[in-house]
Image (cartoon, helix red, strand yellow):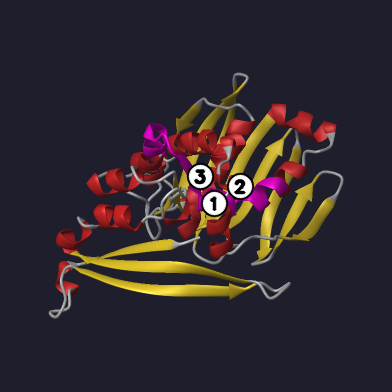
Amino acid sequence: RDARVTETRPAADQPPECGPIQAWVSANCLRLPDGPSLICAEEVSLVGYGDAGVRHFPSLARALRSPDLPMGLLWIERLPARGRLLRELLMLSHRLIVDSHTAAAMTELIALEELVQELTQGVADIGWMRLRPVRLLFAGLFDAPEHAERLAHLESIRIETTTGGRSQGLLLAGWLLARLNITEITVNPNAAEPGQFAWTLRQDGRRVPMDLAAHPGEGGQDELIALHVRADGCDFGVTQVDAEHVALHCPGSGEKHVALHGWDKAELIAAALGTHGLDPAYGEALALAARLAEAEEWNR
């Protein structure tokens, strides 16, 4: 794969000896571990200073694109904002790749969901992909038929994240509510300490409390600390033990520690460009996460 990397910087940072655009070309080569094969890719890096430089990005990307090859738009460091730059770059792209983990505020998920709804291109979210190991482990707690049946009698849901992982917590909550077919959500005014958010869900006419707590400290790669669900008098959960292990809690099985095999960011980006990047469940989870994010506006 060839790469075209663009970066924006303030106009005040523009060196006096150059114009509003700087460019570099490099070749990245990797030797495969199982043989003499060598894979090389070209990387073109563009830096635009201020608006004068950024406005050249779409035309330069158009001129530098490889003919007849699909093109993915990877928007890193922050979530994309609507505007001419995004619109013109999307016209050249077959897929948009974002990282919801970069959301500075929970409410940015609302803008992301609105953008996803408008696009005809496929959207891959590295933040969503990062949650996959936890989602699989938690879903596995309900493999036994009697445990799955307990989910029809929810009593409470609690999610704990690091301060920087609130958007990940909302996506995980959105996934869980989508799987349980719960769409009736009420935001509860929250007078507790900052970082605490609460909702009331309705399941078959019953009120179910759900809350999210963000704590200072370290979580796993996905910034999650714990997911706890109480259903039909039983407790189920996934709790972060260290950076690479979680503890699973399940009735009748006690506590079991398992390794959490995640991908690093480079591996996630590579996977996002392939078939694993497009997950039909993502749209449902993001839509419900956006509704949950209204809690931040409420608390303000």
74 sits left or right of 276 in the view = left
**Residue 168 coordinates in the image, percent (x, y):** 52, 50
The circle on residue 170 is 3
Disc on the earlier residue, 3 or 2? 3
Residue 193 image point, x, y percent: 43, 53
For image coordinates 60% across by 45% down, the residue present is: 275
Image disc number at residue 276: 2
The first of marks 3 and 1 along the sequence is 3
The residue identified by callout 1 is: 272
Tell me where the magenta segment starts and ends, as one range.
113-136
Q: Nearer the viewer, residue 290 or 40?
A: 40
Q: Relative to 105, say whether 189 is above or below.
A: above
Q: CB of mark 3 within 8 Å of CB of mark 2?
A: no
Place of residue 172 in the rendered image (x, y in percent of width and height, measured from the top left): 57, 44
Give the residue at the far right of this rendering: 252
Q: Depth-wise, is mark 3 or mark 2 nearer the camera?
A: 2
